Image: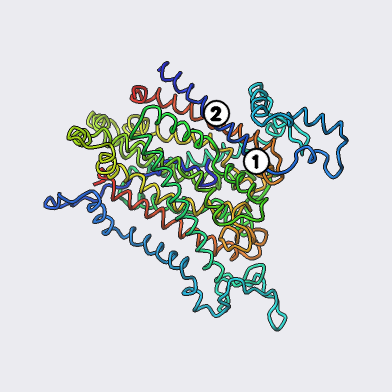
Amino acid sequence: MVRYTIRRILLIIPTFIGASALIFFAGFALPGDPVSAFGGERALPEATRNALIERYRLDQPVFDQYLGYMGDVLTGDFGESVLRRRSINDIFAETFPNTLRLAALAVVFELVIGLLAGIVAALRKGKFLDSLVLVSTIIAISIPVFVLGFSLQYIVGVQWQILPVAGLQEGFRSLILPAFVLGTLSLAYVARLTRTSLAETLREDYVRTAQAKGLRHSRVIGRHALRNALIPVITFIGIDLGALMGGAIVTETIFNINGVGFNLFRAIGTRDNAIVVGFTLIAVMIYLTMSLIVDLLYAALDPRIRYE
Amino acid sequence: MSDTQFQLEHSPPGVPDGEIGEEEVSERTASLWADAWRQLRSKPIFWVSISIITVFTVMAIAPQIFVAPSPATHDPFDCSLRDAEGEFQDRLPPSSEHWFGTDVQGCDYYVRVIYGARVSMVVGVAVTAIGALIGLVLGGIAGFWGGWTDNVISRITDVFFAFPFIVGAILLLSVIQGEGGRTLGDVVLVIGLFSWPTISRIFRGSVIQARGQEYVEAARALGASNRRILVRHVLPNAIAPAIVYATITLGVIISVEATLSFLGVGLQLPAISWGLMINTAQTRIAQSPHLLFFPGAALFLIIFAFILLGDAVRDALDPRTR
């Protein structure tokens, strides 16, 4: 396990270097002069201009800029948004809680509805309920998120008027609709994954043994089958949580939620490089961390993985 | 938390039901492909999805056939805010004259929805072809040769997995905007650039698996060249999962294009794309829900058909389900 852990952690390094370089140079490709953007409508005095160039290392070769930036990042400083005059850390600290709340509620939907549907389908394999789950999950996967978002906004918010359709003014109630939209696709995947995995587990010898011992049905399923069947589902949700930052762009835009995705998308539109690069980099870090945790958890839960 | 369907790494879920099974022993000589085809043919789901896909394919190639019976204009760019009597023609609800109503510019919505099929189908097919080509080549090389080649390719794949697909696509596409509008080709290339890693990873896995089989060793012992082993023995046995994934990807890519166009970084007016139509309509949905409904339903139908087809093909190609 120790060897596996070390190897797995070392693997992150080239990935992180590659992804950060890609982000940095892609951010650089955005047209526009960041220094004149700083002055807005007015031209900047020469001295200010030079000071800014020096501060953001704009006079250095791109590669040196990258190294300097990564040095700052490793000390926890993600730079500063020239347009908004605020540090990236600040903007992130303000917007991340909103995204996190949204994501947490989405995961609750995924777990409650997705798991339940998957378990029911697996236990009734080949029956009506199973087909119902299969068909509705394919339908859920086939509706583009922005179409689903607008449709629910129209039906639930405008026609029925039971939930707010934009912003975060009403606290928890404001989050219900966007969280459901954000979670739908993964909810469908969770349901299908649970169904497949549980159905396979139910055919295992140890489950049959447990049944033969005369254990109660609920105990066989809850204690013996589900525990093992849920390992891939947990993995999926972990990775999924790691992808939440890039993932919430559409939902946050439609529902006007001041989260990470919303701000990232806006920053791409306004050419606010520092936010784009900084936020994307944080997204990559979160993703890498989550997949590391998931892999280690998986190896701990399933010894076969470690010996590949 | 996939808000967008861009997390292509999500393993295509749900291994199918295993209720199929009456194989006749006398037909055991049939290959995997013949077997799979016989299975597919017997499934209504397969024919449903193929029919939907055929309809949309014809719509993309010859939209004239579909717009011919419409009583309104047959030209998607023939729009007028007022008619001859001076009546407003924008955002009319569906009627016997305008089957799907009209949009904010007074264009006939039915004709525009029909003409929108082309972009979706072209992007779906072209991107999947690019993604499959890159993915199969890289995954095949990595899986077959192994060693440091595999290491380098796998690390590159890792980088693309860690990079949020949608952010990368939005970033690249908004750069292109600076040079006088994005073309269909730009959109295809950018989405294609991000769509290969999953196919590559899947194919690498199945090549490694096929490479270790006894029949490959047997072929090698008989003196077969690397090339012959790869083409005759490994490829045919390793390609099935990649094909299944590519079919599902086609649906996902159509959704991606619509989403990017909706966000304003995909195709630009005057192009006709369902995502773009919803983008234009987004502030008027509460008053004119038909502006969302028709392009949304078209998107849903075509994506649904490809995902359904992928499911059916997987059922047919996976011998474990028999």
Task: Name the residue nearer the viewer: A92 or A55.
Answer: A55
- Left or right for A221, reference A157: left
Q: Secondary structure at mark 1?
A: helix
Closer to the chain start, of discs 1 and 2, is: 2
- Distance between the alpha carbons at the discs numbered 1 and 2: 20 Å
The reply to whether dot 1 and dot 2 touch (C-beta < 8 Å) is no
Instruction: Tell me where residue B162 appears, x and y as whole percent.
Output: 52, 34
Evaluate whether residue B93 shows in this view.
no
Q: Is residue B70 above or below residue A220?
A: below
Q: Is residue A72 above or below residue B14?
A: above
Rendering quarter of residue A307: top left
B89 relative position to B314: left or right = right
Number of the front mark, 1 or 2: 1
Identify whether A62 is placed above or below A132. above
- Amino acid type, mark 1: Ala
| Residue B183 visible | yes
Q: Position of residue A41 (x, y in %)?
A: 85, 45
- Image quadrant assignment for residue B198: top left
Location of mark 1 (residue)? A29
Q: Residue B264's x, y, as percent?
A: 63, 53
Picture residue at 86% right of the left edge, 41% below the top: A43
| Label 1 and label 2 in one chain | yes
Q: By what rule are the colours in the image chosen?
A: rainbow
Indicate the chain on which mark 1 is placed. Answer: A
Q: Which residue is mark 2?
A: A16
Residue B285 position (above or below residue A245): below
**Residue plotted at (66% across, 32% down):** A62
